[in-house]
Image (spheres, helix red, strand yellow):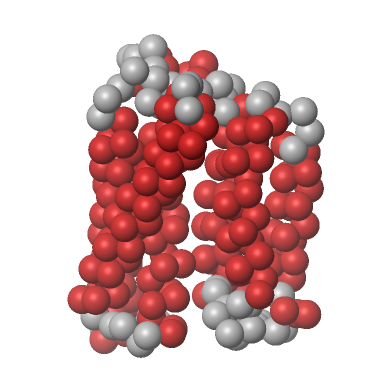
C-alpha cells in the first residue's frame, strides 16, 4: 500500500489500488446525479454540463497515458463541483448569493467571479503537473506556462460563451454570458482567473523553495 503522502503526490499508483481516486469518483457521480435533478433551467444546465462531461471523458480516455496525482484530481473535483452548483441553479441564482452580495456590497451575483478565481487557483496545478510530466518543463517555465494556459483557456471560454449567445439570439447574452449589466464582465472574469493563477503560482513557488531548503539543510533529530 502506498504511504499517505505518496497516495496524493504520486501519479504512478495503479487504478485498482488507488482508493482515494475511487472515493472521489463515487462522490462526484452521486453529487452530479443529485444536481441534475430538476435544475432551474434545463437548457442552461445542458449547456453548462456538456463541456464538463466532455472534459471528464477526455480524462478517462487519456488516463493511462496522462495520469495525474490525486492532489490534482482533488483540485479538479472541487472546481467541477463549484461549476455543477452553477449549472443547477444558474450562476446568477446560487444559494451562496445570500452572503456573497453583502460581502462584495453589490446587487450583482458574484458567484461567477468566485468560480473564475478558483479556476485559476485550482486548475493551475494540474496544468503544471501535465506540463512537467509530458513536456518535461522545469524551473521558470513550470511557473510561467500555467499562467499562460489559464489566461488562454479563460479567453477561449469567453469566446465560446459569446458564440453561444450569438447563436441563441435575443436574450443570449444574459443566458450564456451572464453580464448582469456589466459591460466589462468578460474582462473582469478573465482578470480574476489571472489573479487566481498568480496566487497559486506564488504559493507553489514558496512551497517548492521551502522543500529545497529542507533537503539542503535537514533538521537533526
Residue 7 image point, x, y percent: 61, 75
| Quadrant for the N terminus in the image | bottom right
Nearest the viewer among 187 and 67 is 187
Question: In the image, what residue occupies the spot 44% across and 55% down?
Answer: 122
Residue 5 image point, x, y percent: 56, 74
Total numbered badges shown on the rendered structure: 0
Question: In the image, what residue occupies the spot 25% across and 29% down?
Answer: 184
- Classify residue 93 as left or right of residue 125: right
- Classify residue 61 as left or right of residue 107: right
Q: Is residue 127 above or below residue 48?
A: below
Question: In the image, what residue occupies the spot 43% across and 27% down?
Answer: 173
Question: In the image, what residue occupies the spot 37% across and 53% down?
Answer: 156
Q: Is residue 210 visible?
A: no
Residue 117 image point, x, y percent: 37, 43
Specify the quadrant of the image occupied by residue 63: bottom right
- Classify residue 12 as left or right of residue 166: right
Amino acid at each position: 500500500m502506498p504511504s499517505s503522502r505518496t497516495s496524493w503526490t504520486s501519479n504512478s499508483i495503479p487504478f485498482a489500488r488507488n482508493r482515494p481516486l475511487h472515493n472521489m469518483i463515487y462522490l462526484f457521480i452521486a453529487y452530479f446525479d443529485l444536481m441534475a435533478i430538476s435544475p432551474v433551467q434545463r437548457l442552461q444546465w445542458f449547456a453548462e454540463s456538456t463541456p464538463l462531461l466532455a472534459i471528464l471523458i477526455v480524462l478517462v480516455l487519456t488516463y493511462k497515458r496522462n495520469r495525474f496525482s490525486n492532489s490534482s484530481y482533488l483540485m479538479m473535483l472541487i472546481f467541477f463541483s463549484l461549476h455543477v452548483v452553477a449549472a443547477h441553479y444558474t450562476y446568477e441564482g446560487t444559494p451562496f448569493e445570500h452572503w456573497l452580495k453583502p460581502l462584495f456590497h453589490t446587487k450583482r451575483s458574484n458567484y461567477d467571479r468566485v468560480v473564475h478565481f478558483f479556476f485559476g487557483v485550482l486548475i493551475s496545478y494540474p496544468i503544471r503537473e501535465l506540463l512537467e510530466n509530458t513536456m518535461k518543463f522545469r524551473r521558470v517555465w513550470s511557473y510561467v506556462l500555467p499562467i499562460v494556459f489559464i489566461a488562454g483557456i479563460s479567453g477561449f471560454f469567453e469566446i465560446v460563451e459569446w458564440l453561444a449567445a450569438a447563436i441563441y439570439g435575443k436574450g443570449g447574452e444574459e443566458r450564456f454570458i451572464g453580464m448582469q449589466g456589466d459591460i466589462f464582465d468578460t474582462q473582469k472574469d478573465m482578470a480574476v482567473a489571472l489573479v487566481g493563477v498568480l496566487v497559486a503560482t506564488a504559493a507553489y513557488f514558496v512551497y517548492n523553495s521551502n522543500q529545497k531548503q529542507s533537503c539542503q539543510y535537514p533538521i537533526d533529530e
